Amino acid sequence: MSDATGLTEPPNRLTRHKQKTRARLIRAALSVMARKGADAATINDITEAADVGFGSFYNYFTSKDEILEAATNELFETIGGKIDEAISSIGDPCVALATAIRTFVGILTIRREWAQFIVRAAPGYKRFRMYSRLFRDIQKIHTSKRLEYADPGIVTFAAGGAILFMIIALIEGDLSEADAPKRIAAMVLRMLGEKEGDIQRIIEHPLPALEVDLAS
């Protein structure tokens, strides 16, 4: 709402309270579903974790599916914003792709609960919202003719599936956290046909600080 000067008025106390409660519910849903999976998690689990009355849940969401969708969107928009920031000034599309992947995986090594949520609650490609950004970056490489491959869409599915399986390996302790971002980025570049000598240079590009949290 705007006042007579055209400036937006700050939200009132009730609005702020509703925003904070909704955010608590989303954070709780993410945490519970990361631990139990989307199917096993219940609305009661979520409201208890959020310290919100069961009936109050329906002031914000109509179902468990709706809060799953909200948590998925919130998580991937948060990570996606960090990725967009990291690659915004990079001209080489291969460096941009590798930086995006390293940022994504790097965040998940810090936020292990987020990685667990992605694997246990949002594994399908329609919920794995990084596919759109991954396709964007792979398409840029294809359009620039920096590397040659016939079908960017199929390449995106292959690369995204490989990234998802490597995240599972990371969660299960079969992949070292320390070098996972670079190893996964290098793997995707090899899939796209990048020269081995260039891969090592590309994956050393500086990254921004990776600390990130959901909006409160």
Image (cartoon, helix red, strand yellow):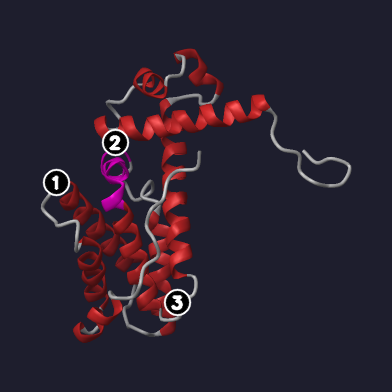
Kindly identify which residue carries mark 2. 34
The picture places residue 201, in percent across and down from the top left corner, at 27, 81
Residue 172: mark: 1
192 within the magenta span: no
118 within the magenta span: yes
Please name the residue shown 22% across and 75% down the image: 190
Judge whether residue 38 can be spotted in this image.
no
Circle 3 Cα neighbour tier, 10 Å, few/some/many (<14 / 14–19 / ≥20): few
Element type at marker 3?
A: loop
Judge whether residue 22 can be spotted in this image.
yes
Residue at mark 1 to residue at mark 2: CA–CA distance: 14 Å
Nearest the viewer among 205 and 46 is 205
Element type at marker 1?
A: loop
Mark 1: amino acid: Glu
Mark 3 or mark 1: whose residue is earlier in sequence? 3
| 4 sits to left or right of 66 | right
Kindly identify which residue carries mark 3. 90
